[in-house]
Amino acid sequence: MVWYICFVLSVLILLVSIQNAFVLSRNYKSGQNLNAFYVTFIGVFLSISVAITPIFFESLQGHDVFALKLIMTVLIQTLQVFTVDSSADFIFEHVVSAATPLVEVYSAYLAVLFFIAPLLTFGFVLSLFRNIFSFVRYVCHYWSDVYVFSALSEKSLCLAKSIKVNHPKALIVFTNVDKDEGSVISEFVDSAKELHAISFQKDIVTVNLMRHSKKANMTFFAIDEDEGDNITYSLKLINTFGDRENTSLYAFSNTVEGEIVFANCSPEKLKVRRINDIRSLIYSFLYNDGHEIFESSKGEDGNKKINAVILGVGRYGTEMLKALSWFGQMDGYDINIHAFDMNPNAETYFTGLCPDLMSPDYNGVSVEGESKYKITIHSGIDVKSGSFASEIAKIPGITFVFVCLGSDSENIKQAANIRMLCERYGSKPVIRLVVYSPEKCSVLVGTSNYRGQEYGFEPIGDRETCYSEDVIMNSELERLALERHVKWGDEKDFWKYEYNYRSSMASAIHMNARIKCGIPGSSKKTEELTQDERDSLELLEHRRWNAYMRSEGYVYSGSLSSDSRNDLAKTHHNLVGFDELTEMDKRKDGSVGTK
């Protein structure tokens, strides 16, 4: 009976461990305490222990402290199996001599377990030596500046390569690296080796990184695909390194949760920056190339017309839609924005984010001293359908198109489709599309059909450009935004509070666009402005600021009193026409452009 019970129990333990290992390998989440290898190791150990128990159960019966001797003997024998130091003949002789019909099955089952056990031991020892070797290498770079990444991925590799080019003596460290996870990871591991990087299997908060010179710079990147992990890692790093000099943390997070969490973290010395890579992409484009939106506009008499089309109102499309509403506030230009999404609730969702921006009191209404724009969201329209083509035909003179439908192939396909439709209806817009692959980006520039007609694609978003030191860590736009912020606020608050950071970034972007559009006085210092230029710029800035604040979800507080402002409620007393402002608010900061 003991043989039957132990055999069934051993098999069940093995099957459960294999099942759990499979689940963990398919749903691997960084930072978890167990991985598939350790679950398998423990399962096989317990399976062998239970399977050989009947042998010693019979031989030790009647001994003093029987249970203790049995447990200790079984554990010692199991350890010997894993170290290839067991007397296998002794065990199999006892199985064969056992009075049970399970002899053949039991012997075969034990043979399989005895074969697997040493292999697992070898894997465990190899894993142990990997981590030891990596740690020794890390300690040997005691004086080097170090850049530590929470994951080994295409994004982190692009950023690491950029850093290595600018800082060849720096040490690159990747954590949470499972070298046996698959072919893609193997390629990443090979790329990491080319950078002479150190790779740890443990996650970024488990590896002991404190053994490093306090005079050396340490920079951490919480850059996992799971934004929840990035927040968790960041909080633990802040707790560990918060009082260390020469230390920075870049936390990649696009969520409101991240914004709230990091705004309430106040480490003593550690510099914390939240990176919203989607917003960074849109803002970087508007700062560097946004002038083309104005240059492609149409019109001879009166204001020039910007007719922009956005395909896809997901995360990228939503960010671009919000940004165009304030970016397009420019003297001499009118902006109309058409956004298409197959989600039937796309307009409702966007209106929930920006209620006053979509309000009929402002959207499509021309009021002196107010922002001027027209936003139309075409919900429930598939860009591959005939309905889409019909709607495009109704938009006169499209001048700018942004394609962001979720994948490189779909974006390229639909960029070609809308180019065809625009050509058919007499428009020649600038077409910008999100393409992650650097190789595809380089090929798409200047692409033409068999007759030599250029598609006019301008891809943005390739990882090598977006995830570089210049964009993430040393952005010129960020520097200009900080300069504008410190004219009225504290630098620490610029980095800590998203409201200050985003507002100053938008202001710097628009100021750059004013200069390129030749707005009178925009390139002058405040003290050099004529009264007419100052009045004109103050009016323009208020129009921009109104649209910007509404794109951030703010609404009018219902009173012109500053006491009525409530940033938790996202209400502001200055969200009114320019003439309704107090003289103090009209003059506030002059052409600096911050409220």
Image (cartoon, rainbow, N blue to C red):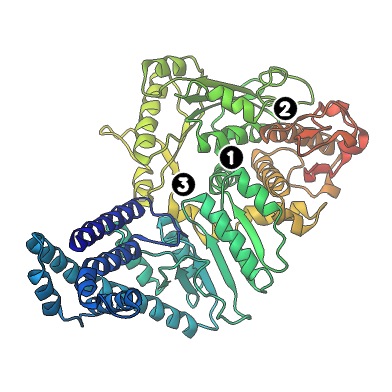
Percent x, y of residue 535: 84, 35
The residue indicated by pointer 2 is: 371
Q: Nearer the viewer, residue 579 or 172?
A: 172
Using the rendered view, name the quadrant where residue 293 is placed.
top right
Percent x, y of residue 147: 52, 69
Q: Nearer the viewer, residue 171 or 593?
A: 171
Percent x, y of residue 254: 57, 46
Residue at disc 2, secondary structure? loop
- Tell which circle, 1 or 2, labels the residue nearer the N-terminal end: 1
Q: Is any part of residue 89 visible from this angle? A: yes
The image shows residue 436, relative to residue 316, as above or below, that is below
Q: Could you classify mark 3 by the number of other residues whose Cα lies within 10 Å: few (under 14), some (14-19), or many (20 or more)? A: many
- Mark 3 vs mark 1: give the one in front: 3
Residue 425 as seen in the image, left or right of residue 489: left
**Residue type at numbered disc 3:** Gly
The residue indicated by pointer 3 is: 461
Which residue sits at x=42%, y=70%? 200
Q: CA distance from mark 1 to mark 2?
A: 19 Å
The residue indicated by pointer 1 is: 291
**Residue type at numbered disc 1:** His
